[in-house]
Image (spheres, rainbow, N blue to C red):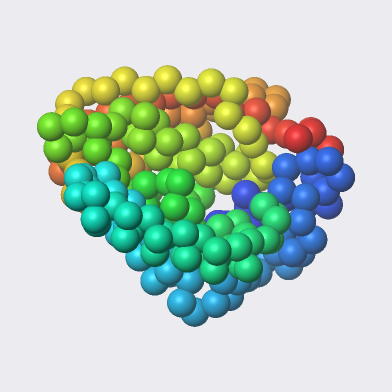
Amino acid sequence: MNEQQAGDSLPNAEHHEGAFRPMTELMNAHDDGTIDITRGGPHYGEFVEQVRGLMDRARLACPSDEQALETIGILKQLNDKLDAAIVDEWSTPTWTRHDLPARGNITLPPFVVDHADREGVDARITFRTFHLGGNNAAHGGQIAIGFDDLLGLAAAVHAGAVTRTASLTVDYRSVTPLNTELKVRAWAERQEGRKVYVRATLHDGDRLCAEAHGLFIVLKPGQP
């Protein structure tokens, strides 16, 4: 995603007081068309990747008592160290790090946006071992999370405004594999006032894994 594409979905001053993403830097990015990709520093991407790697391993780990106790001790030390890096929600790098998969947000399956405009969003997404549901397939809830974020982007770029999810329906058509780069296409079908109706598909090559449709609402000034 480039700076202009990202800027379309950032808030302006109308959304500052008591509303979605009330942060001065984001409003400035909306106004001047620039995105700060330095927050978190040059090693933030590798930091996120190491955390994702830990999540993958924890998903399948069956530690011995000795391993569990040793790991607990190390994790406690790491958590204590990270306490010094905690900032408020609006100051985290994940609002603006469009240079990283899923903006560096570890709550999302990692994806890369190849193109985004009013006609739709094209992205590549990978469900990792952490996102396992069963039998080497992605969990349906994780698929919904990926759809939700990318449909929200499609709605925001189409409307040129900040939106929130009102409804989301996912239809699962075939098994979604893990650790495989998949293609997502998300687009707005139409907009009626503040209502933006959206659709999306998830493909493994030519095979349809899942599709979604939903409704996103353009926020009013000051609306949380």
Outermost residue, bottom side: 42
Res 15 → quadrant: top right
| Direction from residue 141 to residue 6 in the image, left or right | right
Q: Is residue 114 visible?
A: no
Residue 190 lies, with reference to residue 101, above or below; the image says above
Q: Position of residue 123 (x, y in %)?
A: 36, 50
- The residue sitting at 58% across, 75% down in the picture is 38
Residue 180 lies, with reference to residue 176, above or below; the image says below
Q: Position of residue 64 (x, y in %)?
A: 19, 50
Nearest the viewer among 78 and 224 is 78
Q: Is residue 215 visible?
A: yes
| Direction from residue 218 to residue 213 in the image, left or right | left
- The residue sitting at 24% across, 55% down in the picture is 66
| Direction from residue 58 to residue 77 in the image, left or right | right
Res 120 → quadrant: top left
- The residue sitting at 55% across, 77% down in the picture is 41
State which quarter of the image contains the C terminus: top right
- The residue sitting at 37% across, 47% down in the picture is 109
Q: Position of residue 146 (x, y in %)?
A: 40, 39
